[in-house]
Structure formats: C-alpha cells, structure tokens
Amino acid sequence: MSEQWPDIPGITASGGQPRLPAKPDVVVKTLCTALVGIGNGGITRAALVDRVHAATGESRQRLEGLAGWLPLSRVASWNEDTGQLELHPSTDLGDLAMRYAAWVGSQPIPADQVSLLEEYVRTIVEEAMSAARSTPRPPQTASLSAPPPAEARQKRAKEEPLVPPGIARKLRGIVDKLDATFLERRLHNRASLLALLSGNHVLLLGPPGTAKSMLARALCGCFREANYFEYLLSRFTHPDELFGPVSIPGLKEEDYRRLTLGFLPQAHVAFLDEIFKANSAILNSLLTLINERVFHHGRHRDVVPLIGLIGASNELPDPEGGLEALFDRFLVRLAVPPLAEARAFLSVATGRVSPLELDHEDQLSAEDLATVRDAAQHVTVPPRVEDALVGLWRIGGRRDWEISDRRWRQAVAMLKLGVAAEGRRRLDLLDLLLLQPVLAPTPDRIPEVRDAILERLGSGAVPQHDLRAQWLLLRSDKVAPVPGEPLPPPPPSRSHWPQRMARRRANVDRFLEHHAEAVQRLARDRTDLEAQADRHVWIDALPVQVLSAHIEAARDLARILEVGEGYRNQLETSATVARALVMALPERSRRVYGHDLACTLHIPEAQVRVGLTLAGERVPAESVADQRHTTGDLRGENVVVEMQPDELLNWLANAVETTTLLAHTPAWAARNARTALESARRLIGGQLVPSPPELPRP
C-alpha cells in the first residue's frame, strides 16, 4: 500500500467529511503519544491533537475524531474535571491498537471496501506491536476515575437548577394557555415565545385571517407590564408613523428628536404586518433598532426596551428587493396555514375558543427574563451535541441553507436559554429539534431540516455500545473489564486447554455483563428521553423516528444476546466444547477420492456420533446410515473411535497420541482412521476453544 492511504467510507470519512486518520502510522503515532503523555505527567485532548498535528501534519479534524474514540475503547477516558486522559494501567500500545482495530472492524462499510479495511486494521496492529516494545506502559497509579453511569446520573440529579422552579412552572402554564387559545399552533406558540425570551425575532408567513396579529398580542400579554406596538406597513408608510413625530419644540431649540412615547422605540413587543413592504426611509432605522436595540434620531441614541419583534407577511421577500438583511434578522421563520382539522375549525368558527388571559402573577416579569438570560450563559454544550451541530453546519453548507455565522450563534444562544428556562444545565440532542424553523432558509424547507436533525438525533439519542468490537476481541480474550474489575493478565504463550477454557468462559461472562449494561443503558435512556419530552416546555412530542431507533436498537441487542448465550452454552462443560469443536468441522460436500467414510467418531457424553472422511470432513449420522443403506459400505461405520470429551481435548492439544486412540482398532482399518483423525485435528487447528460465531448484522 502506498504512503497515501485512501479514505474508507464510513470509517475514516463520513458523509464526505474526514472522520479518522486514513494512515495507519498516524493512528499508531497518536496512540503512542497518548501513552507517552500520560507517563510524562498527563496529557489533555487539545495537547494530544497539537502534538500529533505538529509531528505528522495530519488534519486536526481527523485527530479530534481519534481522540473522541478513546473512551469507546473502555480502557480510556477524558476526565471531565481536569481534561486529562486516563488509561487503565494494564493497557499498552498493542492492546490499545487492537481495541481500535476491533472497533473499526465492527463498523458497517460498503462491500467493496472490505479488503481495504482489513489491510488498514492489520497494518495498524502490526505497526503497534512493533512499536510497543519501545513505548512505556502508563504508570501504575493511572486509573479510570470517571464515575459509573448510575453515579453520574445521580450526581446530575442532585445539581441545583439554574433558575428557580417557579419560572419553569410559569412558562409551562403560559404555553398550555397559548395551546388552548391557538389551535394547531403548538409549534408556533413555543418557537415564538422562546425566540422572544432569547431576544430574537419571529417571522410569520401566511394568508390573512390566520391569527398572526392575535398571536403577537397574546405573546406580548405573556410579559408583565410590556408595551405593545402594532402597525401595517406599506410602501408609503412614513417614519413618523413608526418612530413618532418630530418634536417641534426640539426643532425650535435646534435639537432634532422624535416623540417616541407610544411608538415602536418604546415597545417591548412589536408586530409589523407586511413588513417586507417597508420603504428605504424606514428600513435602515428599523434594522438598527431590532438588531442593536438602539434608535437613532438626530444626535440622540436611545436604548429601546424591545424584547422581540414579530413580523408578518403574505409572501417571502423579493430576492431582488434588497431585503436580505431584514429577512436574516428573523431567527424563527414559520408558515401559518389555515386550520386543517374539523374539530379545531368548529371550535374557532363557533367561538368556543377562549382568549388568552393571564393573571399578573402568571406573567413573566422583567426579573424573570433577566434571570433566565443570565442563567443561559452557564449552560454547557456536551461533546455529542457539538458533534451534531457540526454535522448540521456541514449539511447546511452543502445544501445552501445560507446560515450566517451570526445566525448560528443566535440559534445556539436560543437553545441555551430554552434549557436554562427549564432549569437544566446542559444541552441535549433532543433540544436540536427547536432548530427546525431556524435553520430552514424558507418555511417550506423545514421538512428537509427536520430530516437532517432527526438523522443526528436518531443515531445519537440511542446510546452507543461497542458489543461488536468486544465480540471481535473475544477471539483473543481481550474483552474490556467491567466496572470494579481489573484487566486479567495476558495469557501465557502455552497453556493447557482447561485454563484456556476457563479464560474464554470468563471473557464471555464479561461480554454478557457488557451486554446487560448496554440493555440497562438503552432502557434508562429511553425512559429519560420520554421523561424529558414530557417535561420539556418547548418540544411538543417525541419524534416517531427516535422511538423507532430505540426499538431497532433493542432488537439488535436481543439478537446479540441470543448468539452470546448460545456461545456461552457451548463452553459450559468439556462435553459441550467437544461437541462444538466436532460439529464445526466442514461437512462433506462431494464424494471423490479422499472424501469416503473412513471411521465413525463417537463421544457418548457429548451426544456426538459422526462419520469422518479421509479429508477430516464431517459426515452426519443420517448420511452415514443413508450410505450404508444405498451402497452397502459398512467400512467406515464399523470402525468406531470412541472417546470421552476430556480425551478428545487432550488429543487435540497433542497430549494424547492418535495411535493410543486406535489401539483397539483392527490393523486393516487403522491407517484410514488415523488419516481421518489427523485431518480432522488439522482442520480444527489446535484452537481447543470453539471460535465465537458471527454476530448478525445490525
């Protein structure tokens, strides 16, 4: 393979974007640098990326991906408090590389990339094994100090909410009353209120008579002592109509100023209908007012109390009209269609819908708003949410969503405020659903954005497990330890089959413990997700796609468990092991020279009675009986080699000679029987422990 390794779709690249280093030597260099860094007093994620980037020139994005994989090895973690990498003290470079190879080898890839992937992982393991001799192990004091998931959950549960619980209850009450008043507008109610809380603006697009102005007035009523301003714009609207008349006494004093009381500069919530018909005389002042919260008139610079502006229009702005800047100022853009359901139509048509009425104590005060906005500054963005945001950013670039950097900053700030308003301290993937009317360049493209969000939500909302990687590691008995259990010492180069059997059973048990933990984590995550959706102020319901992803993950875990338990049963006793080894022999597929029945192998305790050909192939008992019936050939059936399970395993381990097994076999049959047995032993390969079967594909 040349120095320039190509990308492997789904492994070193995903969606056309770099994911992991494509060069095996860079992978090994990174793992080696991590081990050396731990031994030299510690290393952070940023330092690891910087050092390898400086040494190899590899892109930071690929190195970040490899650094993000380290916790998936189950023997490494990034300490949340110190940022330092922690590693299990029994792990060396070869072990870490093998775990990476197993994880990579368990990922789904296109069929035409299989050979490249095999060469990729083989080269990594070979180079790591070669470099391991000169790479120190981490110091024995190193350990994984990250708390188990249950403890981490309990710790999060004890965290104080960022805002008083009364604010979240007040918001939920407001949303419930908005839903009762504005039927079929659940998304509009939540998105508009959240936008105003975060200091952003809302654009409502729809035909007349769809309650756009009514919603704006109701939203203003959610804020205590808030001034409301409403106006219908046209090409002939004069600035005096929006910003107030010019002060005549001021002009007499050569002081140009406007009398803004009762006009837009004094409003907390404003509604401007047909906003895209604003003329150039209004547009510049309007942009400054809604973006900077400052109104310029003469030499005066008045700070305006505007919480948010709600604009309405029957149509999108003309692309040639120079209104792109104004259009971009609206963070949330929503289409407002007429009512679609008969029940909602009758409720509105017959006047059974009650207008929104909020008591004084149920409204949001200025102090409430300040508290929520201050708390939003302390909301954190976990790595998996960061990864999802980066993925959406890249998709937006490819699909021409035309999202400015300012818009991304405002979008994330809005998400943080929504989280803080509920009392939470960190963003979750579910919160990304709130970005649907934010990222869509026009409301008609919201479904496209929703699919992109659900793609990230569907993969990230289901907790990842590495059971397939651990299953591959099972072949070399390198299954990761379970919490509170040390890594077992490496097996000796030569060991008797009872020790190898015991070690494999222990590793299968360890794998099944990992499986049980994955099942518990999935169930816990599903419960948490449903509970979060129930208490979420801003999300109406959990998407069906997320629920289906959990169901499919549960089915996959059930299939893996079936294979794992079946393999554990094969290892239960020496009799079950003997049966598994014999039944794994290839079955005779043709009758040519060397494939005739040579002897019958009988292991009563293992319930095994099969024929063996000279090539060591297995002939099922029913096939032996059929051959005897049709051809009268009794030679192989008459030569019965009977042994106990332990005797078979000792023979496979070369502790018993084949001639000893055939001591009572007639001389005329011993030669063929010996050839058949030796061929069978060669096919089994001296492994003594049955190989794990293949897991079903997800």
Image: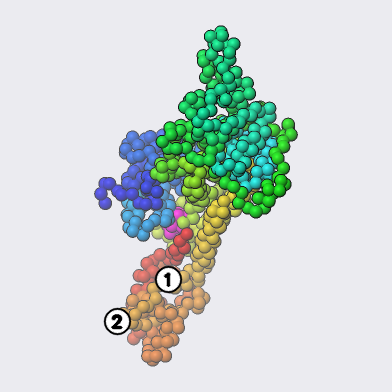
| Along the line of sight, the residue nearer the viewer: 49 or 513 | 49
Q: Is residue 23 left or right of residue 374?
A: left
Q: Is residue 25 magenta?
A: no
Numbered badge on residue 403: none
Asked whether disc 2 touches disc 1, contact meaning CB atoms under 8 Å apart, the reply is no
Q: Residue at x 48, y 32 (%)?
A: 326
Q: Residue at x 57, y 32 (%)?
A: 232
For image coordinates 55% across by 37% down, the residue present is 312
- Residue at the spot of label 1: 584
Residue 525: percent from left, percent from top: 58, 50
Find residue 174 and report its horizontal and vertical position in percent. 68, 38
Residue 593's label in the rendered image is 2
Q: Nearer the viewer, residue 4 or 71?
A: 4
Q: Which residues are drawn in magenta?
A: 469-480
| Residue 604 visible in the current orientation | yes
Give neighbour class at mark 2: few <14, some 14-19, many 20+ (Cα, 10 Å).
few
Can you tell which quarter of the image residue 430 is in? top right
Work out which residue is located at the far top of the displayed protein and give it.
253
Q: Position of residue 18 (x, y in %)?
A: 37, 45
Viewer-nearest residue: 463 or 505: 463
* SS category of the residue bearing label 1: loop
Amino acid type assigned to the residue bearing label 1 in the image? Ala
Classify 556 as above or below 395: below
Q: On screen, 126 above or below 34?
A: below
Would residue 417 be seen by someone viewing this image from the given angle? Answer: no
Q: Does the magenta-highlighted stretch encompass residue 472? A: yes
Of callouts 2 and 1, the N-terminal one: 1
- Alpha-carbon neighbours of circle 1 within 10 Å: few (<14), some, or many (≥20)? some
Q: Rounded to the nearest whole Å, what is the CA distance between mark 2 and mark 1?
A: 22 Å
> Residue flagged by tag 2: what amino acid is it?
Tyr
Q: Residue at x 48, y 25 (%)?
A: 281
**Does residue 46 sit above or below 91 in this rendering?**
above
